[in-house]
Amino acid sequence: MGYPLAGIRVLAMEAAVAGPFATRHLADLGADVVKIERPEGDFARRYDHAVQGLSSYFVWLNRGKRSVVLDWDQPRDREALGRLVARSDVLVHNLGPGAMERLGLGPEALSEQFPRLIHAGISGYGRGGPYESKKSFDLLVQGESGVISLTGTPEQPCKVGISIADLTAGMYAFSSILAALIERQKTGKGGAIDISMLECMAELSGGQINTYRYGGVQLARAGWRHNIIVPYGPYRCGGGKFVNLAVQNEGQWERLCAQVLDLRELASDPRYATNAKRLANRETLEPLIEQVLGKLDEAEVIARLEAADVPYGRINDMREVVAHPQLEARGRWVEYGSEAGPLQMLMHPMNVAGLPQRTDDVPAIGQHTGEVLREIGLT
């Protein structure tokens, strides 16, 4: 099996996270992703200097692409941009509201001039509606979408610790582009894709939205526990350690009580016999679970959970994730080149049988400008 997107050219007018996340996955599948940067570069290049002097976000999101610097305010660079659009199969952008229209590259103009082109725009709120022109960033969309209202402790809401709105929008853009490429094979026509970060986050919150829309219930924040399932979350055991429990059904609950907590009678206690009852009585149940586990060290708790076949996990920090034995055993760390030298990064998780792993470099700013311009007949 070769790269399924070999021969597909993607023009990426992008910055930061959402657009680059989508196009990096296209590059991983073999597409030729030409990343257009203004002379100052993608501002994600300056987020930090943690990776041998390079930005941790930039090297993660932009490997395998070609970087071209264009100042599209200048006529000659605008001409180059137009030629690149004409020779591309896919155009992806997550520029600010109205930016593409000001360049004459709005979706209507693109569809009319380049009917085979697939063009995907990623924005905070999508085209149309009262929020169309609002600037947006991950934090703002987490708040607008209600995700912050669901995250954190009862006393203190918080955002999700990763750029979840950006990343989700990037993945929906990626999957939508793949669908559009399949459709173009059938019809010969491209078309517009309009990805809204707000809509992506609302999709992820579908269960909680239904709980309110049809039950009138705003689910309470439960910290690192669950607001519907009990026991589900980290519970303290001996030595100040925590074990992450995920009890999903009554069989697991019964085994937890009998084989881990050594409290067989707890499983049939009418206060805790079903998940709904455990949820209603969590204030008495969860301290009881921690009281028993607190008398056991982590190794003993894990041994009992393993023997009882009760789902569990650890609460790892980044140091432990980097050294995770499962990632090591599956050979997930791969070397990529960069202007700062070789970098160890995780392979993409699209484990399609026979799909080769692409390990092209992280581009320096403007590294491929001359090369790409010569391909379109410019110096």
Image (cartoon, grey):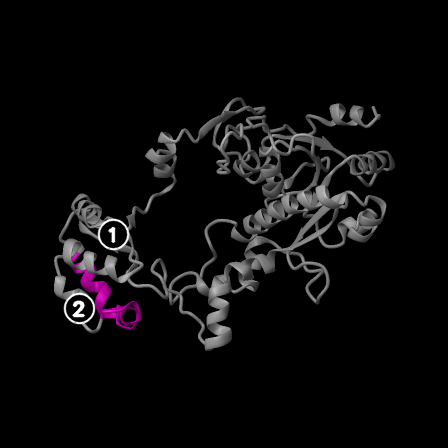
Q: Where is residue 268 in the image (x, y as percent from the top left)?
A: 17, 68
Residue at image point 74% right, 27% down: 369
Mark 2 — residue? 268
Q: Residues within 10 Å of mark 2 (few under 14, many from 20)?
A: few
**As drawn, 312 above or below 144:** above
- How far across and how far down the image is residue 66, in percent? 67, 29
Magenta residues span 272-292
How far is disc 2 from disc 1 in space, using C-alphas? 18 Å
What is the secondary structure assignment of the residue under circle 2? Answer: helix
- As drawn, the label of residue 323 is none
Question: Which quadrant of the structure image shows residue 61?
Answer: top right
Q: Which amino acid does label 1 sit on?
A: Val
Name, please, the residue furthest toward the front. Answer: 186
Q: Residue at x 51, y 58 (%)?
A: 204
State yes or no: residue 223 in magenta.
Answer: no
- The picture quadrant where one finds residue 70 is top right
Please name whichever residue, 26 or 13, is drawn nearer the observer in this view of the structure. 26
Residue that numbered label 1 is attached to: 310
Residue 109 in percent (x, y) is at 83, 50
143 or 181: nearer the eye?
181
Closer to the chain start, of discs 2 and 1, is: 2
Residues at circles 2 and 1 in contact by the CB criterion of under 8 Å: no
Give x and y (percent) for residue 341.
Answer: 53, 22
Q: Tell me: 179 left or right of 153.
A: right
Q: Quadrant of the N terminus?
A: top right
- In the rendered image, is residue 294 in sight? no
